[in-house]
Image (cartoon, grey):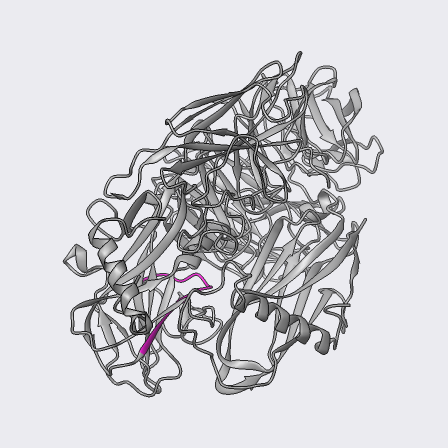
Amino acid sequence: MIGSKNSYSLISLMVLLLLAAAALGGCATTSSSPTPVPPVVNTAPLELAVRVCDSGTPNCAGETKFSLGSLHDLQVSVDWKNMPGGTHTQEITFLLPNGVVYQSVSHGFGVTEGALGSPTVGGAMPVAGTYITQRELTGQWTVKVSLDGTVMAMQSVEFQP
Amino acid sequence: MFFERSVSSRINPWVLFLTSLALLLGAAETGLAREKKSVHKSATDAQARGGDTYIDAGSVATNFGAADPLLVRSKTTSGQRSLLLFDLSTLANVGVKAATLKLNVISIGHNNRVYEAHNVTSLWTELGATWTDRFGATAWGALGGDFNATATDSFTINGQTTPFTMKFDITPDVQGWYTGSTNFGTLIKQSSTGANDATGISFNSRETATVADRPGLEVTFLQQVSSLSATAGNATVTLNWTNPIPLAGSTVLESYAGVLILRQQDKPVSPTTNPTDGTSFSQCNSIGSNNDVVVFVDASSATSFTDNGVCGGLSNDHVYSYKVFAVDTAHNYSTVCGTATSGTGACATNASAVAPEVTAVPSATTVYQATWVVNTLAASLAPPGLNPGTSIVTGSNKLVFDVNASTGVPVTPPVSIGGTVSGRAAEIDSADASIGHDVVYAPAQDDFIYAINTGTGAFDWIVSPASVPFTAGASVQLKTFSSASYTLAQDLVVVGTHNTGTTTANQIFGLNGNTGATVWTLTGGSLVPLVPSMDIITAAPMVDYGNNAIWVATHSNGGTSQPSLWKLNSNGLAGAGVVLFTANLGPIDSSPTLGPQSDVLFVPVTGGALTAIDPVTGNTLGSVNPGDGGVKNSPAIATFTMPYTVVFTTNSQVWAYKFSCPTTPCLANGGTFTKLWGGTAVSNPSAPLTFFGISKVYVGDGVGKIHELDASTGVDGKQRVLNPSTPSVTVGDVAIDSLLNHVLASATDGRSYAFTIPF
């Protein structure tokens, strides 16, 4: 399962594939710069693990199904490894079962120049009492994690009545 | 092409020669779209939403928003970076093909240094940004600004002499700003791989006297058609539109030729279906994986097309979606696709979402069409905010759209803010607002409340009274409509927090509508003054002008052990607190509704009873729960005086009850609910909407429709299909523009719709 805790190897492979696809021009929004500048010289592959939890659940290791009747906020935590030094922006996008964007949350963060960092960067989507529960927007939602404008991981979560 | 850039040295000299020759012959723009315009601050463009500044690692708390020139250099502990933001209001409805940032560099340091343009990812302000903070005391996520690590473009100093124009191709960023990404501008920095450069570069800011020297964003684009409308008939649909004319100040590259129209049945034309630039299409061609069909190709500037069933025919009583692209003589289309590399990979995500679309239902018996449809690039279920007859405001993810109420055409590109607006944006007309101009108040999930001047799109103020999210809309008590008992000098904006980390200590704030300053604060569980526990707030507060009070509904920790209905003193009297009384009714998700005479408050207890409260005494006057899972949304009132006809929804039905009381004022438990009709079956209904004089009830459902019920009988007489797609589309809470006779709603397909009423 993509994004389950400690699934670094699988996600690393996906990251590499995504980066390769971007390099081959498959991503419409990648830079058109002819002189891309790598943020830091390193060979360690960037890795991530995605945990999706109810904000009201302590010590949550990651879940894929949530009951709308009890869900507080959908809390997403992304554990990064080998993050190059410099400034980065992580964006978490929540997609409805029909694939339409419902909302997104982004965070800028920094890693010491010249080093590889292991930050955990999160974001949440309020659920309790919102239109998600009022109108019972159940089904398979998608959590999309992007780093610096490039999609790095997608995970499906199910909202149940 | 950017010949100043070092990359040009790697280009084959013959290519350079031929390209230069083509430029001289005026043919080098082949493949470019029709118009090119430079956006910058000038006498005719105030750039109200724009700004520029630099931030300094050596003066981390100093703002340089008024500085000229701006500085960029990479130097340990004292480097500088520059921030630029352009107001694209003059290019509100365009398909962007290319965008070039131009800076007038007046001094340079070391040769061969690389300068980079990065897309900024957090909101900042010209007079607030510093090395540490975005605005006010709000810190960047990382010191020195939040931006994408990968440069959008770069420029290498290569022997230039000053002054010269430094250019960056930021096409992907600008295209993103039109297709759902936030526009927080561009950051210019030296490459982090460079060593210390004590001088760096300086370039003129927008404060410099010579207009031509100010930073500019040169955008190449096609405008969209405007005033698109559809008229359905018996097996026919007629479309009308107005073709664009060149904008003032633009350079015309190629002539507009006409339009290309795509059609789809029983689902929208896909926002990812893009007619490829440079390609001519024929009628009945199919484009994209959605198999959208070309039904009209015109090169004679036609302004009308009647679809009599070309390319497979029109079947009555089906929903047809049309999307109209402007096209020029080189077959460039008004999509957000780059012309330099047309085709696969050249288009932004949802590159055709910006092209106007409309829907119509031909029929032998009951024809209808949407008055307008606007793609808001993300889903929202909040009712649109209204300035009746003038504009509609819809929050969608982190964008706030202001569209013309008559046509649905965006007045400006959406305003980018820092967090999702999930409640209704409160729009106030200039004639009523104490701030003196049209304004929108939008609480957001990034813990901020935004006041936006809808005339310019500029921020009036941004405040964060608490570091917790806001999911409900704001309510505004307007001084001009308030009684003498309202003692505040300005309008009052009331917002409540959605802090799921506590069930006891949520907060309500009363803010000065002119400045955002906190007038009063109510914190659940505080001891001085004594305030009961307060759970999350998911419903917009409600203003009670008759009693000079604010009503707030809250959750209540899952039961009735703590309050869920709060009556607050608008004035927030010092020392006495603001709570006038509370009621423990059980969790409430939706706003209560006040009788037009301010004599009964109807409170929808989620999954429970519709409860009538005396707004003066707080007494419960009566309640009703018809079953079907209990009350679901805010009620609506169809009568002007007692007895009131109250309409509300449950899980799958709509109900109307008469509420009456034999005494005036009504005594505790003295009121009576009498069923008038119901339950009328409506799948997953929204909050209903009706009011005195319209005799209809409008309600959205969970399968893509708005229903029109007879307010007297509850008969579900007519419906309007917004989008019958599978999986089904949920229609949000509706709004009514009583001046234009429109019912409005947004939906989970990422669009807002308007239909003429009555159906």
Can you say whether B461 is above or below A63 in the image? above
Q: Depth check: B617 or B393 in front?
A: B393
| Corner quadrant of residue B7 | bottom left
Horizontal and vertical percent position of residue B489: 38, 44
Give the quadrant of the C terminus of chain B.
top right
B510 to the left or right of B558: left
Seen as rendered, the residue at the extreme front is B14
Horizontal and vertical percent position of residue B276: 48, 45
Horizontal and vertical percent position of residue B321: 59, 31
Give the quadrant of the N terminus of chain B.
bottom left
- Give the residues in magenta: B114-126
B304 to the left or right of B62: right
| Corner quadrant of residue B628 | top right
Is residue B52 visible to the viewer in this orientation of the structure?
yes
Residue at point 43%, 32% (across, down): B259
Can you say whether A76 is above or below B251 in the image? below
Horizontal and vertical percent position of residue A13: 68, 74
Residue at point 49%, 71% (across, down): B141
Can you say whether A26 is above or below B255 in the image? below
Q: How many marks?
A: 0
Is residue B668 visible to the viewer in this orientation of the structure?
no
Seen as rendered, the residue at the extreme right is B627
Reply yes or no: does residue B509 show up in magenta: no
B581 to the left or right of B436: right
Reply yes or no: does residue B124 show up in magenta: yes
Q: Depth check: B544 or B292 in front?
A: B292
Can you say whether B389 is above or below B344 in the image? above
